[in-house]
Image (cartoon, rainbow, N blue to C red):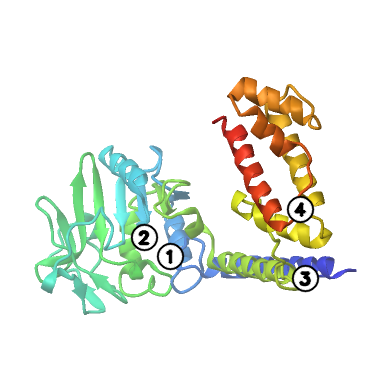
Amino acid sequence: MNGSRRGLLWVALIAVVIIGLAVIGRSGKRSAEPLAPDSTSPSGLRGLVLLTESFGADVDIIDGAPGADRTVAFMPADNFGRTDTSAMSQWVRNGGILVVADPQSSFVPKLGGPLSTGVVSESRIAAGDCTIRALANASGISVDDAFAFRSPAGATRCFTVGSDAVIVAIPDGKGTIVAVGGSSMFQNSNLDEADNSVVAVSLLAPKQGTKVAFVRGPSLGAGDETLWGLIRPGIRYGLLQIAIAFLLFAIWRGRRLGRPVLEIPRIEIEGSELITAVGHLLERTNSPTYAAAVLRADTRREIARRVGGAHADDAEGLAVVLDARMGANRDRVRALLIDTPVRDEDELVALAQQLYSLREEVLSGKR
């Protein structure tokens, strides 16, 4: 097995282990989630579901707003987005009773108390000036933490703290919103304390056959969380570790074994460098006449390719064509293109300059 396959095998093995641990962790924590209707942990609500069913209520656990067949909805935590909030408001106005135990919910009234914090310091709260008839048999509640609300006009209240109350019932259309200043009294650990169970049954199952909806969370696609936020933390961490492992593997496999090899680009010889090239040619041949013949042959080929009408070896023909088409001096062109002996380096350099000028005239079309 080569190094590449061995590395991929390790990445796959790590991915399987992480996903397995995430799944095991999810199944192990499912019954320990706070405020979950099926949670048996101290902060769960399984006891409340069983208590409500024991008094003849038809309990359904849902996501999002309840349907028209439900008469009471219990919302321990408000995680709704705008769509679900609007649907729940319409359901209440059509005659539903919403019991919401989240002091930060958009359905509850303003908090009371000093500085409008609404925090209640007492753990046991007496009914006080209770005007909610359904709670007439409850004398007090026990809470771990609670908030008190200001009572809006037309509302009834119970378990008062000064001028505020922990439970406030607000009419809304044909229905009612019952705002409870905390969910601790409904949790498994506190349900048997004081009259907490009496309050729970009086609000959720006031009569035999009440159809109750336990609202677990927002409906699919209607919450405010992103897709990444809906993924459980264990799975998110697993995916993050897989991404890091893949990145490290890619860096390892993509390493370079040496410095990059720089390719020398081709550089065309400019006209000003032609004389230098001629000098190098002369140094290699030690024959000005041979170098002149090479330069003249190259110039004839380029002129013939450019203007046509004569062969590259026919200097006389090229002179005639240039005279006819461009008005070039026939004798001058003939003298430059016909091979004649060159005696020294100075004559060769002068010839090279003249050939360059002639070539530029032909290529540019100027006389």
Q: Evaluate whether residue 113 shows in this view.
A: no
Separation of marks 1 and 4 at Cα, in angstroms: 108 Å
Give the labeled residue for mark 3. 10
Q: Which residue is mark 1?
A: 35
Q: Residues within 10 Å of mark 3 (few under 14, many from 20)?
A: few
Which quadrant is the N terminus positioned in?
bottom right
Looking at the image, which is closer to me, 349 or 172?
349
Give the number of the disc on residue 196. none
Q: Nearer the viewer, residue 257 or 294?
A: 294
Q: Are marks 1 and 2 in contact (CB under 8 Å)?
A: yes
The residue located at (75%, 65%) in the rendering is 12
Q: Residues within 10 Å of mark 1 (few under 14, many from 20)?
A: many
Placement of 333 over or under 117, stated as above or below: above
Answer whether labels 2 and 4 touch (C-beta < 8 Å). no
The residue under label 2 is 77
Secondary structure beneath dot 4 equals loop
Q: Quadrant of residue 74?
A: bottom left
**At which x and y percent is residue 21?**
66, 70
Quote the CA–CA distance across marks 4 and 3: 78 Å
* Foreground tag (2 vs 3): 3
The type of residue carrying mark 4 is: Arg
